[in-house]
Image (spheres, helix red, strand yellow):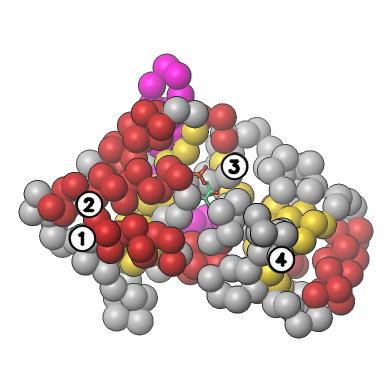
Amino acid sequence: MSDNLKRAAADRAAELVTDGMRLGLGTGSTAAHFVSAIGERVRAGLKVVGVPTSEATREQAQREGIPLSTLDETPDLDLTVDGADEIDDDLRLIKGGGGALLREKIVASASQRMIVIADGSKLVSKLGRFPLPIEVVPFGLTATERAIVRLLDSLGMSGELILRHAPDGAAYVTDGGHFILDAHLGRIDKPNVLASTLNNIPGVVEHGLFLGLATGAILATGDGLVELGQL
Ligand SMILES: O=C(CO)[C@H](O)[C@H](O)COP(=O)(O)O
């Protein structure tokens, strides 16, 4: 998707922001356009406070001059705007392609509304073609990996689990100091069952299924913006 379309979706989301809002600031190339749009409005006088979902977003928001807070100081947020790797018609998401899923989920859960901004090609009829990121504690990695494989087997699912690597070849480490296993599942027929059972495995910190969190979406397509849910 061209940067212009990403920016158009981000600008539409920025229109939803009003004075006094407490904002969750997402992570990724589309969310970065939103942070930049909010930065412009802040410099023009908008009064908001932002809670970033990653160190990368924190650095960008600081450069933009957006006043920042934490969930400890500001535990209730009005609106989070974030990207997604997949979204279905029921506003269920796969997130975490950028590795920020844990903070993204905590921030989205603390928000009254979560608006997704994404490329229209990320709209799918069934989740799972995008590998599902599963954030795990480094301690006991192989045992945790085996427990995930056993769970997938018991749910009649299969697919490779691949440890994510950084460009330098080392294991990718999240902002929380964890690893990510990308589960190449192809399709996820019962996201709710998978989500809740994954969370029961010791060593699994979080996964990229965001269910019941997004309240609306703005999808950028070649024909313009498509809005889903409530904006
Ligand atoms: O979940 C994410 C980061 O953890 C991103 O929102 C997701 O990967 C989409 O990124 P982009 O807007 O660059 O396509």
* Mark closest to the chain's N terminus, 4 or 1: 1
Secondary-structure class at tag 4: loop
Q: Residues within 10 Å of mark 1 (few under 14, many from 20)?
A: some
Q: Quadrant of residue 46?
A: bottom left
Magenta extent: 209-227
User: Which residue is painted at 81% across and 81% down in the image?
Assistant: 140
Please tell me whether residue 204 belongs to the stretch shown in magenta: no
| Marks 1 and 3, the one that precedes in the sequence | 1
Total marks shown come to 4
| Camera-nearest residue between 174 and 151 | 174
Q: Position of residue 192 (x, y in %)?
A: 68, 57
Please name the residue shown 72% across and 60% down the image.
Answer: 169
Which residue is under mark 4? 171
Q: Of discs 3 and 2, which sits in the foreground? A: 2
The mark nearer the N terminus, 1 or 2, is 2
Residue 136 is drawn in which quadrant? bottom right
Q: Which mark is residue 65?
A: 1
Binning the other alpha carbons within 10 Å of mark 2 as few (below 14), some (14 to 19) or many (20 upward) gives: many
- In this figure, which residue is indicated by the disc labeled 3? 86
Picture coordinates of residue 174, whole percent (x, y): 59, 68
Specify few, some or many for label 3: CA neighbours under 10 Å numbering under 14, 14-19, or 20 or more.
many
Residue marked by disc 2 = 39
How far separated are the C-alphas under marks 4 and 1? 33 Å
Marks 1/2: CA–CA distance:
6 Å
Residue 196, can we see it? Answer: no
